[in-house]
Amino acid sequence: MQIDVFTLFPEWFEWFSDQRHMKNLAAAGTTLDVVDMRATTPIANNRVDDTPYGGGAGMVIRVDVVEAALRARYGADPAELRQRRRVVVLSPVGRRLDDGLAEELAREPELTLLCGRYEGFDQRVHDHFASDVISVGDYVLSGGELAAMVVIDAVTRKLPEAHGDERSALEESFSKELDGAPEYPHYTRPAEHRGWPVPEVLFSGNHAEIERWRREQSELRRVTRDLPS
Ligand code: SAH
């Protein structure tokens, strides 16, 4: 998978790209390229934003700045680009990221992520360049960089090359394998800690019974969400 992320703060991705998770993916052919939108701005003095029409606080990232960055990268009209690759605008107003959407994006050979800053992008970026507008939750971050990292992490986890043991990625919270429910609890050594027990069934060696117990626990968590009782 080829991932391009467009940002005004490319240095945010230096640490991220350097982590083992991303390095393993790179070794398996998944690339993450970071594109600095300021580098191609057509506006004097390297500006990328302007005051909002209609007034109000904050600055808005200009549509012509995003157009120039996309054109420079893909050599194509950005208004047509979205017909052949997913171009995602990160924005709190977008479709909420969930496991299904992560699966969907993981099937794409190429992915473009546009990170906003300040008040966000001129609406025409959403309307004419984006195939998707994606939110990582109903709260507001200062920039799209962390949101893009969340999307990249959730999506690349779905790629087979991200895992030594592929099963661990299959039976995860919200996956089809668990019918969309949160995952069941895990336990490991010690068998006893401060008198807090491990459920007996896990020592039974009865795989069918263990599986049944795990499914039950998983279903229960749809309701409890593992909140302290
Ligand atoms: N004025 C906007 C918020 C802008 S926050 C509003 O009220 O909706 C600046 C940038 O951070 C956005 O352009 C977006 O790229 C990113 N961002 C903030 N919160 C986000 C979220 N929940 N999901 C995805 N991106 C987010």
Image (spheres, rainbow, N blue to C red):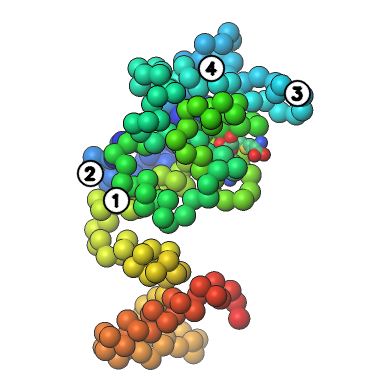
- The residue at the point 42 percent across, 86 percent down is 198
Q: Which mark is residue 28?
A: 2
Q: Quadrant of residue 55?
A: top right
In the depicted view, which residue is nearer to us: 26 or 103? 103
Mark 1 → mark 3, Cα distance in angstroms: 45 Å
In the structure shown, which secondary structural element does the residue marked by tag 4 occupy? helix
Q: Residue at x 56, y 39 (%)?
A: 91
Name the kind of residue labelled 1 in the image: Leu
Earlier in the chain: of badge 1 and badge 2, it is: 2
The residue depicted at 56 percent of the width and 76 percent of the height is 224
Q: Please state if 203 lies on the left or on the right of 91 as rendered.
A: left
Instruction: Determine which of the numbered discs, if any, sits on residue 42 in the image.
Output: none
The nearer-to-camera label among 1 and 2 is 1
The residue to which callout 4 is attached is 64
The first of marks 4 and 2 along the sequence is 2
Please give left or right for residue 164 compared with residue 130 in the image: left
Q: CA distance from mark 1 to mark 4?
A: 34 Å
Residue at image mark 3: 54
Q: Secondary structure at mark 1?
A: loop
Instruction: Characterize the local packing of mark 3: few (<14), some (14-19) or many (20 or more) Cα atoms within 10 angstroms.
Output: few
Pick whichever of labels 3 and 2 is earlier in the sequence. Answer: 2
> Which kind of residue does numbered mark 3 sit on?
Gly
In the picture shown, does residue 48 fall above or below 190? above
